[in-house]
Amino acid sequence: MGDTVSIVFDGPAGVGKSTIAKALARKLGYTYVDTGA
C-alpha cells in the first residue's frame, strides 16, 4: 500500500486558506479536497 499525504489548513474565514491550498496542491501535483466544514 502506498503512503498517503494529508495537508490541513486551519484558521479564521477570509485569510486565504483555500487559495493557498489550491495553489500548493497544483504546484505539488496533489489533489485538492474541500471538506466543506
Image (cartoon, rainbow, N blue to C red):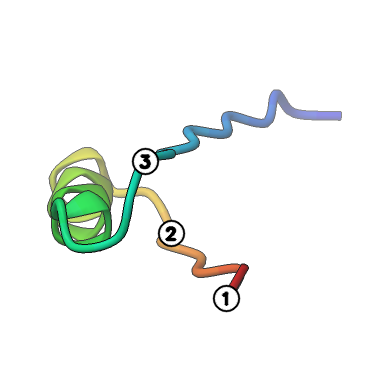
Figure quadrant of the C terminus: bottom right
Q: Residue at x 36, y 41 (%)?
A: 11
Q: Which residue is mark 1?
A: 36
Q: CA distance from mark 3 to mark 1?
A: 14 Å
Q: Crowdedness of circle 2 by 10 Å Cα count: few (<14), some, many (20+)? A: few
Q: What kind of residue is marked 3?
A: Gly
Q: Earlier in the sequence, mark 2 or mark 3?
A: 3
Q: CA distance from mark 2 to mark 1?
A: 15 Å
Q: Is residue 24 above or below residue 5?
A: below
Q: What kind of residue is marked 2?
A: Thr
Along the viewing direction, whichever of 17 and 31 lies nearer the viewer: 17
Q: Crowdedness of circle 3 by 10 Å Cα count: few (<14), some, many (20+)? A: few
**Quarter residue 27 falls in:** top left
Q: Which residue is mark 2?
A: 31
Extreme-right residue of the structure: 1
Q: Earlier in the sequence, mark 2 or mark 1?
A: 2
Q: How many marks?
A: 3
Q: Position of residue 2 (x, y in %)?
A: 75, 28
Q: Position of residue 23 (x, y in %)?
A: 13, 53
Per the image, label 1 sits on a secondary structure element best described as loop
Per the image, label 2 sits on a secondary structure element best described as loop
Figure quadrant of the N terminus: top right
Q: Is residue 22 left or right of residue 32?
A: left
- The reply to whether callout 2 and callout 1 are in contact (CB within 8 Å) is no
Q: Residue at x 23, y 39 (%)?
A: 28
